[in-house]
Image (cartoon, grey):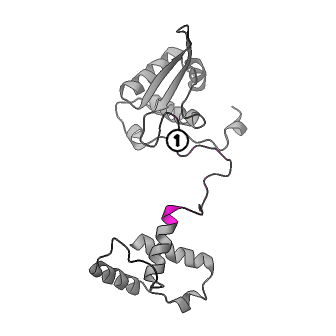
Amino acid sequence: MDNEKYIGYYAILNSKILFNEGLKANEKLLYATITLLANKEGYCFATNTYLANLFKVQAHTISSWISHLSKLEFVKVKIIKNEKREIIQRRIYINDVPYTEKNTYPYGIKNTEGMYQKVQYNNINNKIDRLFNYIINNEGNKIEEFTEEKEIEFRNILQQLELNYTKGMLEIFRKENIEKIKTIIYALK
């Protein structure tokens, strides 16, 4: 097998599949392989023959495994036909919450750099900044989830953990360290 062409591709095997006693080990591996092949288009269009060559089994064995996965509703099989009602393609979709028929698995490879570590206008970053500005800088609107008692309790926790910094103290910190403090405070909330 030419390992170079597989660098950067990952198969997904969720716990429902991994610990399912009703599935054979190779059916679990086939499911993982389908997730790998579905990364680009959102579905796997590999033939039974192709998959059989990968697993060193007969094509009818692959068909049986896919049927079993479909029966247990782990995958959804869609047959595409032309205007003459001839089968032109089989599409195998992963029947999992983050998967949809038109989207790829959330871990799909659209760019080779991987997932972005920080997105500039990310909603969670806005929440972290709002909390930080309210707690540390005493600026901004009160956090909706905080009652007066919860806010006092939260400030006490920050004091116990020695995270009750002032603006003056934060001026000597590097930006990366302030970002870490923001994240820790948000996680504590």
User: Where is residue 149, by image quadrant?
Assistant: bottom left
Left or right relative to 188: residue 29: right
Residue drawn 43% across the image and 81% down it? 135
The magenta segment is 102-125
In this orientation, which residue lies closer to the viewer: 147 or 45?
147
Numbered disc total: 1
Query: Residue 171 location in percent, x, y?
Result: 59, 88
Residue drawn 60% across the image and 53% down it? 115
Residue drawn 52% across the image and 41% down it? 105
- Position of residue 114 relative to residue 180, above or below, is above
Packing grade of label 1 (10 A; few <14, some 14-19, many >=20) is many
| Magenta stretch: dominant secondary structure | loop
User: Where is residue 83, by image quadrant?
Assistant: top right
Query: Residue 130 location in percent, x, y?
Result: 47, 74
Amino acid beneath label 1? Tyr
- Position of residue 2 relative to residue 151, above or below, is above
Circle 1 residue: 105
Query: Residue 169 location in percent, x, y?
Result: 54, 90
Query: Residue 1 location in percent, x, y?
Result: 68, 31
Residue at the farthest front position:
141
Residue at the farthest bottom position:
168
In this orientation, which residue lies closer to the viewer: 18 or 114?
114
In this orientation, which residue lies closer to the viewer: 154 or 85?
85
Left or right relative to 88: residue 7: right
Left or right relative to 168: residue 76: left
113 in the magenta segment? yes
Q: Quadrant of the C terminus?
A: bottom left
